Image (tube, rainbow, N blue to C red):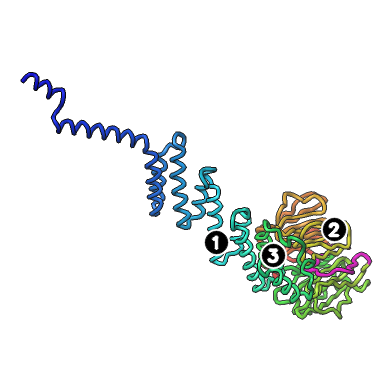
């Protein structure tokens, strides 16, 4: 019996042995679980994310020590990003993939997020926003073709809306894609009669892809301006009301303020001692000093824009050519063609061609690059490039970088900023004027005074006021 009891003590009964074995298994399994908890957390994160429980999935990932178990941590984040991408949460997915750096194919997956987001925007017809995304990843598989498709559809949309020049420029950028070149050629010919698209819209890149959205946004914003609604001469100021009538104040010794009977006016311009107005039928009228024939505009027709130097009147015609009258020794425009916009200074005349090239009658006003807007004075000029960046023939005043419109005067230079607030800088005094802080629609900078037209129709004038040329406080041009 004693031997049997010893045997039982050394070798427990079956139930006890089973319990001990089970406990050992659990201990071993627990150890395995402890060592592989991060692995299971990563997998659970993937399962939670797959059913849209992203917060739960993130909690599982947060339990993983990113420093000591980087592989499982990255795996869990990768699963969450993958699920978000599949669910159309492109921004969040991209952020996670970018954060993973060089883990697996995370970099390519981040590009895929951008591409998928662009495709979604294309389906909504937002081709411009899609293009902005795709232009950054043109190197990624399929993105170049998607970008071209965006631009193709965007261009057709612009042409349908009447923005034929922008549409043609976009198509010329991608002229090897589908029938882009043929449509660009047809569009330019129908609107200008020219079969030379290269000359009309510009060379290799009519609009650089990286500034395309800025260019289109700028052209849209400029539609809020009222070009030719305010003008300043030597000693008089002229304002155009929305009903087509004209107000004037200041010196009238040459009859430059005899504008009271004018109607159906769509633009005005002021020279030193004369005033001109473009009428809705494309003809022009003028009053004031005519010593050099600057008011001999009675035969003009098909005019779409007017400007004036001190002793000239200038007109841009529908066919892209320029006509002038007055003291023409300093304003010779022979050979100018394809002009989209004109501007003038005291003695200089500038024209911006459809391809953004600037023509200038005086060397001090010549600027390089593709310009959308410009203005000239006696010895300098200021311009606005396709991206809205300010360019200047000398040092740019203040901290100005971008604008929607630029203006030049004898002593002053001005801009309407992207938020439509105006700014005027005195070049000799090197100081800014304090202007009413509200949206502006236009401005005109004369030799010794200037005027700002605000969107609410009010006009603010500053400078010399000997003849009452700044007495516009009671004007409302709306």
**Left or right of 120, for residue 362:** right
Q: Is residue 317 visible?
A: yes
- In terms of image quadrants, where is residue 211? bottom right
Q: Residue at x 83, y 70 (%)?
A: 337
Look at the image and say whether residue 341 sits in the magenta stretch: yes
Label 2 vs label 3: CA separation? 36 Å
**Marks 2, 1: nearer the viewer:** 1
Q: Residue at x 39, y 52 (%)?
A: 53
Disc 2 or 1, which lies upstream in sequence? 1
Dots 2, 1 in contact, CB < 8 A: no
Disc 3 or 1, which lies upstream in sequence? 1
**Label 2, on which residue?**
365
Mark number displayed over residue 119: 1
The residues colored magenta run: 329-347
Disc 2 or 3, which lies upstream in sequence? 3
Position in image of residue 436 (x %, y %):
68, 58
Q: Is residue 468 visible?
A: no
- In terms of image quadrants, where is residue 374? bottom right
**Left or right of 460, for residue 81:** left
**Marks 3, 1: nearer the viewer:** 3
Dots 2, 3 in contact, CB < 8 A: no
């Amino acid at each position: 019996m004693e031997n049997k009891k010893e045997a039982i003590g050394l070798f427990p009964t079956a139930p006890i042995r089973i319990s001990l074995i089970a406990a050992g298994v659990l201990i071993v399994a627990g150890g395995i679980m402890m060592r592989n908890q991060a692995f299971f957390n990563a997998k659970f994160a993937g399962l939670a994310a797959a059913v849209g429980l992203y917060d739960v999935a993130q909690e599982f990932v947060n339990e993983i020590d990113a420093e000591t178990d980087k592989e499982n941590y990255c795996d869990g984040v990768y699963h969450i990003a993958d699920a978000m991408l599949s669910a159309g949460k492109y921004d969040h997915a991209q952020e996670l993939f970018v954060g993973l750096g060089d883990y697996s194919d995370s970099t390519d997956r981040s590009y895929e997020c951008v591409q998928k987001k662009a495709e979604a925007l294309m389906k909504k017809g937002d081709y411009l926003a899609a293009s902005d995304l795709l232009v950054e990843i043109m190197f990624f598989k399929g993105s170049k073709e998607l970008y071209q498709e965006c631009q193709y559809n965007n261009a057709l949309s612009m042409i349908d809306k009447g923005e034929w020049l922008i549409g043609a420029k976009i198509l010329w950028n991608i002229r090897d894609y589908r029938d882009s070149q043929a449509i660009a050629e047809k569009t330019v010919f129908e609107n200008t009669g020219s079969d030379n698209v290269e000359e009309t819209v510009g060379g290799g890149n009519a609009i650089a892809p990286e500034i395309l959205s800025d260019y289109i946004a700028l052209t849209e914003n400029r539609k809020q301006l009222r070009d030719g609604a305010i003008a300043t001469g030597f000693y008089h100021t002229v304002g155009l009301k929305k009903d087509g009538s004209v107000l004037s104040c200041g010196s009238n010794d040459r009859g430059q303020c005899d504008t009271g009977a004018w109607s159906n006016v769509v633009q005005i311009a002021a020279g030193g001692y004369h005033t001109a107005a473009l009428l809705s039928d494309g003809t022009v009228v003028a009053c004031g000093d005519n010593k050099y024939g600057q008011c001999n505009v009675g035969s003009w027709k098909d005019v779409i824009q007017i400007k004036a130097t001190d002793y000239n009147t200038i007109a841009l015609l529908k066919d892209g050519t320029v006509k002038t009258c007055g003291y023409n020794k300093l304003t010779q425009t022979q050979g100018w063609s394809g002009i989209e916009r004109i501007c003038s200074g005291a003695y200089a005349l500038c024209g911006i061609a459809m391809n953004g090239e600037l023509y200038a009658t005086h060397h001090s006003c010549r600027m390089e690059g593709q310009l959308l807007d410009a203005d000239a004075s006696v010895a300098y000029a200021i311009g606005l490039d396709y991206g809205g960046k300010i360019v200047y023939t000398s040092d740019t005043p203040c901290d100005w970088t971008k604008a929607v419109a630029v203006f030049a005067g004898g002593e002053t230079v001005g801009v309407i900023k992207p938020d439509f607030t105006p700014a005027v800088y005195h070049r000799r005094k090197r100081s800014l004027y304090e202007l009413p802080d509200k949206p502006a629609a236009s401005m005109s900078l004369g030799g010794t005074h200037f005027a700002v037209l605000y969107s609410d129709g009010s006009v603010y004038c500053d400078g010399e006021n000997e003849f009452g040329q700044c007495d516009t406080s009671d004007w409302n041009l709306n």
